[in-house]
Image: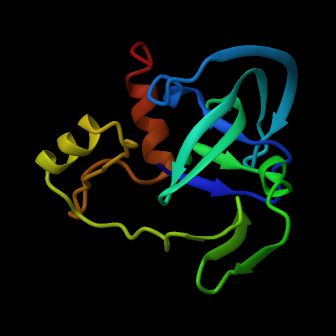
Amino acid sequence: MNVLIDTDSTNNFMDVKITKRLACHIEQCEKFEVKIVDGRTLICESKCSNVKLSLQDQELVVDFFLLPLEDYEVVLGIDWLRTLGDISWNFAKLVIKFMLNGKQVVLKGKRCWHVKTITNHRIERILQNERHGFLLQLTNSEKSNYPTTQQELETLLLEFFDIF
């Protein structure tokens, strides 16, 4: 599960697509706007309370608002962070430490993923396991014979005006 611990997010959010997998009971909530990183504003109108979540062998119970998230399945925001008390962060090692039920919890983040080539069989296995999809684009590195200047393109469009 891809989880973002986000100090810029006031609330906790869960991707609507994983509510079935986590057997969440969806409730309606008072609608509110959520401004996301890319500048868009989404409307939130549902939530799941007391969701049991296993995060690196740590059991958490968290309330989530539901949104269509793209990069993460769960965003843990200030609502969750403020329940932890004192927190120790090490951004160089991507580690967060806190006390939970009298025990020290250490969560380790992932380094950035690297782009790599994989086979179509591997893609099928990934998608069957309900992982995120991705776009693969193959391009030809040979020079094409298609018009490359604005003038050539305009001439071509005028020649076939009735089609375009």
Residue 73 horizontal/vertical position (percent):
55, 42
| Res. 127 image quadrant | top left
> Eyeballing the image, is 92 above or below 67?
below
The answer to whether residue 2 is left or right of residue 156 is: right
Residue 152 at x, y percent in the picture = 43, 46
User: Position of 132 compared to 129: left or right?
Assistant: right
The picture places residue 58, in percent across and down from the top left corner, at 54, 57
Residue in view at x 19 percent, y 43 percent: 125
Q: Residue at x 50, y 69 (%)?
A: 110
Residue occupying the point 47% across, 58% down: 57
Q: Is 43 left or right of 96, judged from the image as shown? A: right
**Quarter of the figure with the C terminus:** top left
Foreground pick, 52 / 21 = 52
In the image, 40 versus 128, the foreground residue is 128
* Residue at the (74%, 42%) spot, across then down: 12
Q: Please tell me which residue lies in front, 15 or 47.
A: 47
Residue 69 visible in the displayed image:
no
- Colour treatment of the image: rainbow
